[in-house]
Image: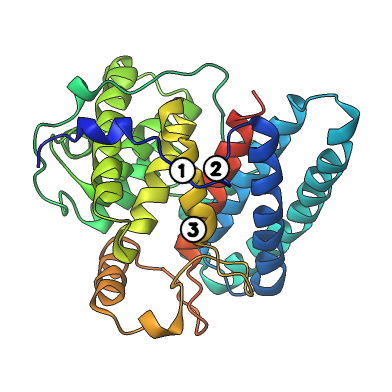
């Protein structure tokens, strides 16, 4: 599909449009408080994806506090953020303990990324370059989940007990740089390079990390603009938010569009505080069924609750909204 430059000109918004940083903060904080309440009620049942999303959120909240404006009228908001950080610290500890009990092998493979000091957040910002995006996309199944997890664990050093980290096999090199991948395979290629950055891996492949990030996020921006053009179908919202979370974490500020923030805020399930299926009326729609099938293929431990809440939806929503707050405090 052709790149959609006219979407960049979309500026219309409702009267409630978020125009200033205080508006952004006052809109995001209540939503994040509800998300935290969801975690408080479900921490024993959420999966590793959700714990990861909340860990990223906690990191963003701490980073936002460091940059928080000192105006007197913002002290109440600051107190709200401090309260969330404190609550999340306790809940993450409990949720991590539950993961160890419920899925010890999977937890062992990905324990490092759940640590409080693993993630690194941007201090300078770039914009994606449309010319760097793939002209067309190939398969949405560029590699298997098993292959992806193996490559991740080689970087993390969790492929065996006391394993060496930053191992790059030829198969992983080929897989994680394979061109024209789409959807979750593309975002997981980016995640591979994020892991390498955080671990400080020195393989010569990672001398080109920024080049790959530029290409991946330009392509992920292209995908998100197509999702927007198509009306934010239910089956695409999870991917849309994952792209924002990961490319925002990679320092691309153009993913933090206020019109996108406004959309994401409307997707929260108000009673539960989570993100997932927006209503029971849509429970059996073809779009939702497509989404469930996609989640089963790319995230073998996705947890869908009876009330429509999704662990992965909620994780990427928490991570992306935390990024919006962090960016607008910087």
Q: Residues within 10 Å of mark 2 (few under 14, many from 20)?
A: some
Q: Is residue 132 left or right of residue 257?
A: left
Which residue corresponds to mark 3?
49
> What x and y, as percent, mark residue 88?
73, 54
> What x and y, as percent, mark residue 302?
41, 68
> What x and y, as percent, mark residue 309?
51, 73
Which residue corresponds to mark 1?
13
Q: Earlier in the sequence, mark 3 or mark 2?
A: 2
Disc 3 to disc 2, C-alpha distance? 31 Å
**Label 2 near label 1: C-beta < 8 Å?**
yes
Residue at horizontal 23 percent and vertical 32 percent from the top: 6
| 136 or 162, nearer to the observer | 136
Query: Which label sits in the foreground, 3 or 1?
Result: 1
Element class at badge 2: loop
Q: Is residue 311 left or right of residue 88?
A: left
Query: Which label sits in the foreground, 3 or 2?
Result: 2
Q: Is residue 11 left or right of residue 107?
A: left
| 97 or 12, nearer to the observer | 12
Which residue corresponds to mark 2?
17
The answer to whether residue 125 is above or below residue 165 is: above
Residue at horizontal 73 percent and vertical 60 percent from the top: 91
Return the residue found at the far right. 72
The answer to whether residue 184 is above or below residue 283 is: above
């Amino acid at each position: 599909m052709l790149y959609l430059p006219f979407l960049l000109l979309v500026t219309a918004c409702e009267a409630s449009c978020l125009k200033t940083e205080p508006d952004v903060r006052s809109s995001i904080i209540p939503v994040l408080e509800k998300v935290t309440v969801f975690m408080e009620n479900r921490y024993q049942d959420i999966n590793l994806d959700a714990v990861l999303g909340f860990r990223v959120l906690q990191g963003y909240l701490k980073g936002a506090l460091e940059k928080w404006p000192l105006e007197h009228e913002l002290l109440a908001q600051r107190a709200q953020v401090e309260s969330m950080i404190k609550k999340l610290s306790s809940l993450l500890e409990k949720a991590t303990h539950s993961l160890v009990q419920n899925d010890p092998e999977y937890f062992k493979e990905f324990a490092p990324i759940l640590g409080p000091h693993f993630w690194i957040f941007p201090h300078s910002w770039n914009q994606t370059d449309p010319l760097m995006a793939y002209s067309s996309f190939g398969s949405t199944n560029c590699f298997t989940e098993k292959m992806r997890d193996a490559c991740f664990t080689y970087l993390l050093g969790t492929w065996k007990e006391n394993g060496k980290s930053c191992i790059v096999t030829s198969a992983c090199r080929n897989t994680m740089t394979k061109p024209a991948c789409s959807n979750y395979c593309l975002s997981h290629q980016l995640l591979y390079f994020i892991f390498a950055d955080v671990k400080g891996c020195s393989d010569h492949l990672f001398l080109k990390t920024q080049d790959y990030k530029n290409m991946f996020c330009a392509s992920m921006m292209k995908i998100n603009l197509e999702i927007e053009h198509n009306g934010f179908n239910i089956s695409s919202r999870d991917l849309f938010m994952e792209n924002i979370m990961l490319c925002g974490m990679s320092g691309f500020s153009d993913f933090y569009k206020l019109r996108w923030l406004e959309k994401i805020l409307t997707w929260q399930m108000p009673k539960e505080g989570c993100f997932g299926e927006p209503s029971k009326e849509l429970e059996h729609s073809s779009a939702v069924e497509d989404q469930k099938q996609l989640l089963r293929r790319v995230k073998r431990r996705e947890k869908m609750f009876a009330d429509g809440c999704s662990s992965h939806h909620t994780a990427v929503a928490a991570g992306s909204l935390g990024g919006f707050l962090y960016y607008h405090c910087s």
